[in-house]
Amino acid sequence: MKKIYAKEAYCIGCRLCEVYCITQHSKSKDIVKAYKVEHQAVPRLFVEESGHVSFAVQCRHCDDAPCIDACITGAMHRNPETHAVLCDEDKCVGCWMCVMVCPYGVINRNTKEKKVASKCDLCAGEDTPVCVANCPNEALVYEEREGEK
Amino acid sequence: MRYVIIGNSTAGLSAVEAIRSLDKKGEITVISDEPYEAYSRPLITYWLAGKVDDARMHYKGGEFYRNLKVNLTAGKKAVRIDSKKKSALLEDGEEVPYDRLLLATGGTPIVPPLKGGDFLGVFTFTRWDDAKKVREYLTEHKVKDVIVVGGGLIGLKTTEALVELGLKVTVLELADRILSATFDRKASQLMTAYLKDKGVDILTENTAEEIIGEGGMVSGVKLRDGRKLSCGMVVLAIGVKPNISLTEGTGIKTNRGIIVDSRMRTSVPDVYAAGDVAEAHDSLIDASRSIAIWPLAVRGGRIAGVNMAGGSTEYGGGFPMNSVEIHGLPTVSVGITDPKEGGYTITEEYKPQDYVYRKIVSKDGKIRGVIFVGRIDRAGLFTGLIEDGIDVSSIKDHLLQDDFGIIALPKEYLKHNVTGPGVEV
């Protein structure tokens, strides 16, 4: 499957990916409203920095996904067509079992309204996830790689 | 091939999925003494609080049995296994023959022999029917206060639901602190303070000596210290033990739970066990024991299913882990959280005024356990390091820093685990 890959050599830690991720998952999909009015979405990726090194990391959509095994509600599931690991937020009760088992630490908690696990959905419906589309340095790419399902 | 699975919860269903992935034709029968399609046991407190409705309890969805061609025998108890004849006997006399049998019978609540324990209004709380009876009793008798006996995970999640329903709850805990099986003293104290702030009374080193009733119904509890507390309901949540009653007379070896090998086979041919009833390998203490948690039930069930269907796979071991949020205070505890022996190093952040406590337990450079209270974000990074046995000596000072993340992990681990699936570092 197509996944998002980070190229650390080009990432300058500008966090535009985070801005666009939050906006995409906001109610209005408007940057200003998302940040100034709604405050409802949380980033579904994590920008990590250490000195001059940085990269963004989000769900790896593992073949053997521990978050799906740990889910007590059936919310965390794999889309049978795209193979993406997705959280059905209507089913989620915010028990955080997935947060506890994700070895990449890339499932966020959204407690702004109903408590739900918030994770990368590859911007379902978009051709290219917004973090990738809006990275000014092409430090995030969305592609199929050999050896990766 | 006839597969029979006794137990309709997550270990059993995980085995069903594994069997079906390898054997499209074999006949699969799931037997359950509960009259329901599979529902999520951990959700019963959410259901009681009204946060999850009936439909949402069925986490596998309505099509599971049809899609995987499973015969579900729900509402009939399996009462005996004849391992020579290879059949399971149901309570109504029906015999169900098997070629491969999985015991995924879970746990049963421990009920102390209490005087007055048979009054109406005394409940255990592990099944959906328990929650239904509790809801009915609460409404019918206009209960205002409840005594929960046992300050473990089930007791406190039940407490949370009852408080959310507007009830006054008193928790009795025999040990000197709540959550003593998964937390250390500091974490227990934080949760105690937090719950007291929410109006919950917690009495430790105390328990119910006798249940007092009037007209056949519970009206209070006599405590060990001689005091009497009145209440409209008692919930017994002392603990759960592996439900091994079906092994009687079969020759299946048991300790507290059913002994299994790394393929989840019991000591009797063609009989497997998985989930809370099985004693599988604990990779942190290098011994076998029952660890009654959902993710390991899924894992054990899958291993059993693959092997039952003629595949070959081994259980790599597991360790305890729990994520429990109570009244908005999230907590995660993984592995060895409160070591009694020496040789362990403790790193911690403790801010009781903010209800924040983060503790890392290491030995020989490797993380063996963590407790997070109040701040659990990215907890899985630590679970991964424990699972993979990664030496973190070089980054030990970073572990509890705010910016700790994948970027701080040892380079070798990164290359191995992170670069492969996607981050070029």
Image (cartoon, rainbow, N blue to C red):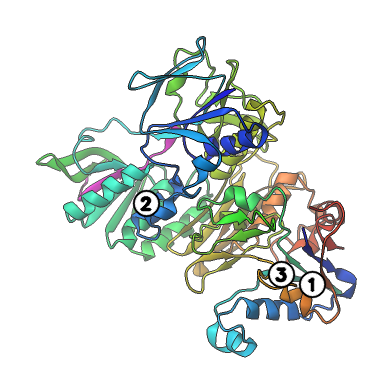
Q: Residues within 10 Å of mark 3 (few under 14, many from 20)?
A: many
* Residue B86 image offset from top left, x and y in percent: 51, 14
Mark linked to residue A49 = 1
* Residue B93 image offset from top left, x and y in percent: 35, 18
Chain designation of label 3: A
Outermost residue toward the right in this view: A9
Chain designation of label 1: A
| Tag 1 near tag 2, CB within 8 Å | no
- CA distance separating discs 1 and 2: 41 Å
Magenta stretch holds residue B382: no
Q: Quadrant of the N terminus of chain B?
A: top right
Q: Quadrant of the C terminus of chain B?
A: bottom right
| Tag 1 near tag 3, CB within 8 Å | no
- CA distance separating discs 2 and 3: 34 Å
Question: Is residue B282 toward the left or the right of residue B325 in the image?
Answer: right
* Residue B12 image offset from top left, x and y in percent: 53, 35
Which residue appears at 70% of the width and 77% of the height?
A18
Outermost residue toward the left in this view: B215
Chain designation of label 2: B
Which amino acid type corresponds to the residue marked 3 in the rendered image?
Phe
- CA distance separating discs 1 and 3: 10 Å
What residue sits right under mark 2 in the picture? Answer: B158
Mark linked to residue A46 = 3
